[in-house]
Image (cartoon, coloured by chain):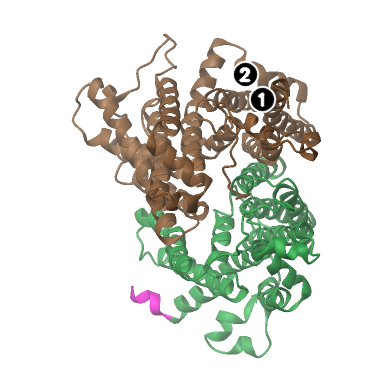
Chain colours: A green, B brown
Amino acid sequence: MSDLFTQSAIVAVVAGGIRLAVPLLVASLGETYGQRSGVLNLGVDGIMLLGAFGGYYTVLKTGSPWIGLLVGVGIGVIMGLVSALMAVTLKAEQGISGIGVFLFGLGFSDLLFQKWVGTPRPITKFPKLDIPGLSDIPWLGEMFFQHSVVIYLAFAAIPLSMWVINKTTFGMNIRAVGENPEAADSLGVSVSRIRWATVTIGGTLAGIAGAILAIDLGIFQQNITNAQGFIAIALVYFGAWRPLGIMLGSLLYGLVNALVLQMKVLEIIPTDWSDIAAMTPAVITILALVVVATRFSPPSALTKPFTRGA
Amino acid sequence: MSLEDVRRRRVLAYSVPILAVLGALVIGAIMLVALNADVVKGFSKLFTGAFGSGSALIETALKATPLLFVGVGITIAFRANVINIGGEGQMVAGGLLSTIVALNAPDLGPFVMIPLVMTAGLVGGAIWGAIPGALKAYYGVNEILSTIMLNVVAVQLMNYLLRGPLIDPLEVERGTRIPQTERLVESADLPRILGSGRFHIGPLIAILAAVVAYILLWRTPIGYRIRAVGQNASASRYAGIPVKRTVVLALTMSGALCGLAGAVLVFGSESHRMVTDGSTAGFTGSAGFNGIVAALFGGLHPLWTIPASFLFGGLLVGGLALQRAVQVPSALILALNGLVVIFVVSSDRFRKRLLERPPAVIEDGNNTAAPAATATGPPEATDPGGGDA
């Protein structure tokens, strides 16, 4: 156990935690837009898987992680539009339609991977960026300021989302549509247009999250997300539908995962117990849901399709 | 609206999910073309592989069995306005508990063992359903999220148990360490019937479960409460119905049926043991999710879920034949499966609208009696999602 408290182990846990938090953070931020406007998109995991494969395959072919990320964006937009069509226009039961997207993403990404790639080959990762000056600080430098570029960008999306949701007209409309669509509608806000926009934003960020996940790991495999998309949805609840809360939640997750990983590396957790250790994120999520549910309530119109005059 | 109109609309309503499946298959065909596979050969295999021969029909019935259990379970939960996405985990929990019982109980002969292990499956699934039920009723935790997380917990639990405490001692001895139990006690094997060697009594148990669920939902006070809570929780509360307890009960029963599906999978399997490939789908064949589609197909009615499960089971068996015929990785099935879910769920609104509302022409007039005519008859078209409440 004492191995865990050495500098290298602690630094590895914190730095690793931040890295592992990023795909969750990005996907959760995206899901927040949809949920604040009253749409629960359960398909995040499937979109992440498609984004992950698209990103991986593009980097494999072009050698550029940035083009890979761009493909992740494109896949995210398309899947976001499809999700919006289902949830907003066709008013599909939101608890189930997303499961369809998940199954499709799980199967289709694996199908293309087996057909086009076969054996996993490593790819170029995102370039690392050591922040001048700060990265030289002992301990903290290695923890916070020696990451790849996308990680800084992902954290920059937090204040941006706070501003969009809380300070812009678009954000105000999102919140209005999520809390009281009838009132918003009577004031001339198009409920469906706002929801189309938010679900598409959510899909896009899920695609990006998947691409970041695969390109950051430099690899793709079947079900690479391992239910992270579902955890991202739960994190939106955990963070009480606020970007800052979501950041804290994602970081907590990343840290717990990194800690478990580090304890496995140091053989503090015997290999027999690795399956039990793998339960931790899901168990923490359930406990967190209980705590959050007693204090915060979701947007009033969450999961309720809107029909004018109904 | 004349009676004939009602009938015509109902027929149209039932063709909606079928059209949706065809839509999904069209997308599937486009995918096959893109992958340079022989589409015509593939699709002819889809139908012959599912319904084309006696053994195909048996395979379809066996595949339909877990779908029917889960579909009926989902229906009960839906009727209480609870969405149970946890069928996968509940199946695993039922499979595990029934396996543990079979491994530890003394051999008491088939007449005791079979009911015993089936009950264990029922209890395992019930526990896994009661947890999200209680969390929803007493803490307000969204059941969609909690059931998904419990799916994750269940699969890790299964992997741990089958790799560790429950592993076949022979696997340890040989050093192969395939995560599976030893061959379970023979007296717990589900009896094979029809002389095929494959077909067991599982499908019959599932049909029985559907009938019992139908009686429970429409002929008992418990079922009345479940449906009342699903229709209008606050009105039910004023009427003196214990809403919270009813919600827990609905999810518990839903889980119990999924657990039974898990037990039938274990004791009806060819290998007569529980095996894991590390994922839930490896054990359940995604029946925990597909059962939801079967339930929607069946209009959330236990009896209609019987033919719906059979059709959907056929689609899955046929999909497997298609995949083998055109030599595409089996992940195709999962992708097709997802497309079917997407199309069926997205088209559900049209089905409901056909069943619920009088035609637009009448809406303009002052005909208030018409809607009542459509709402009678077995496949009641209530809105389980409660979205319009």
Circle 1 residues within 10 Å: few <14, some 14–19, many ≥20? many
- Residue A163 in the image: x percent, y percent? 71, 78
Q: Looking at the image, which is closer to me, B14 or A256?
A: B14
Amino acid, disc 2 = Gly
- Give the extent of the magenta segment: A1-6
Which residue corresponds to mark 2? B49
Image location of residue B387, percent across then percent down:
62, 49
| Residue A100 found in image quarter | top right
Residue drawn at (68%, 69%) of the image: A175
Q: Which of B148 and B240 is in front in this view?
A: B240
Q: Is the magenta stretch mostly helix, strand or loop?
A: helix
Same chain check for tags 1 and 2: yes
The residue located at (54%, 59%) in the rendering is A231
Q: Which amino acid does label 1 sit on?
A: Leu
Nearest to the observer: residue B134 or residue B158: B134
- Seen in the picture, residue B8 relative to A57 is either above or below; the reply is above
Specify the quadrant of the image occupied by residue B310.
Answer: top right
